[in-house]
């Protein structure tokens, strides 16, 4: 290639890139710069409406008319689902479409119910999960998740849904219903979510959460052993009523949206959850998830500020054993078919939880948030 040709080629590339940058993003997506601005100003925590020591961790979310003893009736909705845990979408009589997660042998629904109830009680945004006695799905194929995977692979709806009939219902005992936290997803690419290392880009000066709140969230993620923390399992969201005229968000939220892989490396796995240490190095206030599956995924080694350690303790210490016992019992954690008998004992789970709070208390004292920020940590 001659010099003139090379210069012409580079000019073409630069022009093409500029043209691409100037083009609006696809519908439903925003530019990287817009996402960066939302991330910088996002919050991870708000003071809970109910004092933590009064939070009811044993019932479904309030004011939804969904007691955990009720059977829910719905109609199968042919919508794509992701992930590996069995699930499908279903339309309620009201017209609302909800996600149903099922399978008595599946540990994720119980773990997600427990984790989301805990986060909500502590003030961290989370989806709403509902325990049911059963879900009666009209028009469901016998194995809906398998059928949906089949459709995704082949595009052949009828062969993949053999056995489904609008006049016949399939019952899923103990299924869990998920209602997402309301609001618009903020993403520059589909299913982008956010990664834990991006929390370093939140700026309190621009309205974002403080270092104390972010470090407390990190500690609670380790307490839960939220090891499947790839980007799509978290969500950057603009709550209803917070959209500005220019398309930006007045009060963006950073939330964890998929908490099924929690409470141990094998999911609601008491024996191994108990062995997950809160600190990689307590004296240095260093945390890590590298001992968990995926080598920590997007949650790298990080140092916790003293403000963050104290804030986590301020949130966790008001929890009573009775609250936690109700949490592990009613979420289905103790009903799951555990390998060991102690997995059915709510008090064993509570004791393990309380031990993790004690580990947080025994760490440090940690460097101040200002010190760590000044050192780029």
Image: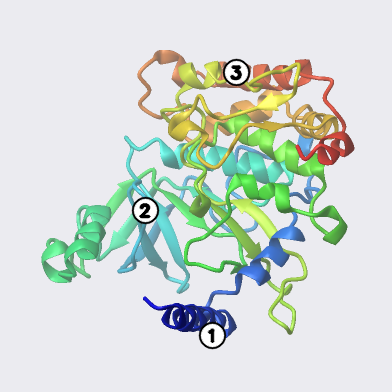
**Residue that badge 2 annotates:** 135
Tell me the residue at 74%/43% (across/down). Answer: 214
Question: As rendered, which of 204 and 46 lies closer to the eye?
Answer: 204
* N-terminal label among 3 and 2: 2
| Mark pair 1, 2: CA separation | 51 Å
* N-terminal label among 3 and 1: 1
Question: As rendered, which of 167 and 50 lies closer to the eye?
Answer: 50
* N-terminal label among 1 and 2: 1
In the displayed structure, would residue 308 be above or below residue 360?
below
In the displayed structure, would residue 102 be above or below residue 38?
above
In the displayed structure, would residue 344 be above or below residue 371?
above
Q: Locate the N terminus by quadrant.
A: bottom left
- Taking the image as shown, residue 77 lies to the left or right of residue 272, namely left
Tell me the residue at 71%/47% (across/down). Answer: 200
Point out which mark residue 141 bears. none
Asked where in the image residue 40 lies, by quadrant, the reply is bottom right
Asked where in the image residue 116 lies, by quadrant, the reply is top right
| Whether label 3 touches label 2, CB < 8 Å | no
Q: Where is residue 333 in the image (x, y as percent from the top left)?
A: 47, 31
Q: Judge whether residue 62 can be spotted in this image.
A: no
Tell me the residue at 81%/32% (across/down). Answer: 305
Question: As rendered, which of 201 and 18 lies closer to the eye?
Answer: 18
Q: Where is residue 194 in the image (x, y as percent from the top left)?
A: 58, 54
- Taking the image as shown, residue 350 lies to the left or right of residue 39, namely left
Mark 1, mark 2: which one is toward the viewer? Answer: 1
Secondary element under disc 2, as helix, strand or loop, is strand
> Callout 3 environment at 10 Å: few (<14), some (14 to 19), or many (20+)?
some
Point out which mark residue 352 bears. 3
Point out which mark residue 19 bears. 1
């Amino acid at each position: 290639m001659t010099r003139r040709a090379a210069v012409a080629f580079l000019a073409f590339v630069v022009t093409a890139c500029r043209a691409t940058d100037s083009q609006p993003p696809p519908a439903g997506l925003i530019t990287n710069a817009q996402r960066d601005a939302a991330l910088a100003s996002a919050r991870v925590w708000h003071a809970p409406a109910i004092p933590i020591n009064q939070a009811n961790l044993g019932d479904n979310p309030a004011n939804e008319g969904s007691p955990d003893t009720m059977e829910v009736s719905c109609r199968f909705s042919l919508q794509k689902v992701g992930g590996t845990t069995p699930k499908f979408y279903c339309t309620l009589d009201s017209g609302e479409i909800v996600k149903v997660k099922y399978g008595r042998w599946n540990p994720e629904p119980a773990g997600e119910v427990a984790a989301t109830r805990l986060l909500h009680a502590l003030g961290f945004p989370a989806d709403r999960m509902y325990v049911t006695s059963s879900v009666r799905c009209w028009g469901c194929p016998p194995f809906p998740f398998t059928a949906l995977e089949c459709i995704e692979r082949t595009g052949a709806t009828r062969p993949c849904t053999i056995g489904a009939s609008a006049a016949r219902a399939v019952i899923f005992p103990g299924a869990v219903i998920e209602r997402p936290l309301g609001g618009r997803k903020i993403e520059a690419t589909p299913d982008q979510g956010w990664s834990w290392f991006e929390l370093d880009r939140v700026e309190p000066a621009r309205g974002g959460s403080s270092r104390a709140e972010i470090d407390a969230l990190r500690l609670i993620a380790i307490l839960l052993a939220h090891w499947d923390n790839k980007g799509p399992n978290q969500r950057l969201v603009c709550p209803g009523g917070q959209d500005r005229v220019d398309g930006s968000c007045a009060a963006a939220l950073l939330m964890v949206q998929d908490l099924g892989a929690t409470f141990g490396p094998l999911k609601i796995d008491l024996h191994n959850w108990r062995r997950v240490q809160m600190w990689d190095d307590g004296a240095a206030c260093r945390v890590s998830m590298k001992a968990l599956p995926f080598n920590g995924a997007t949650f790298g080694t990080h140092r916790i500020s003293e403000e963050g350690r104290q804030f986590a303790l301020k949130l966790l210490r008001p929890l009573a054993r009775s609250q936690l016992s109700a949490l592990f019992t009613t979420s289905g954690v103790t009903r799951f078919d555990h390998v060991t008998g102690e997995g059915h004992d709510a008090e064993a789970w509570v004791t393990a939880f309380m031990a993790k709070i004690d580990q947080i208390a025994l760490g440090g004292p940690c460097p101040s948030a200002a010190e760590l920020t000044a050192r780029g940590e």
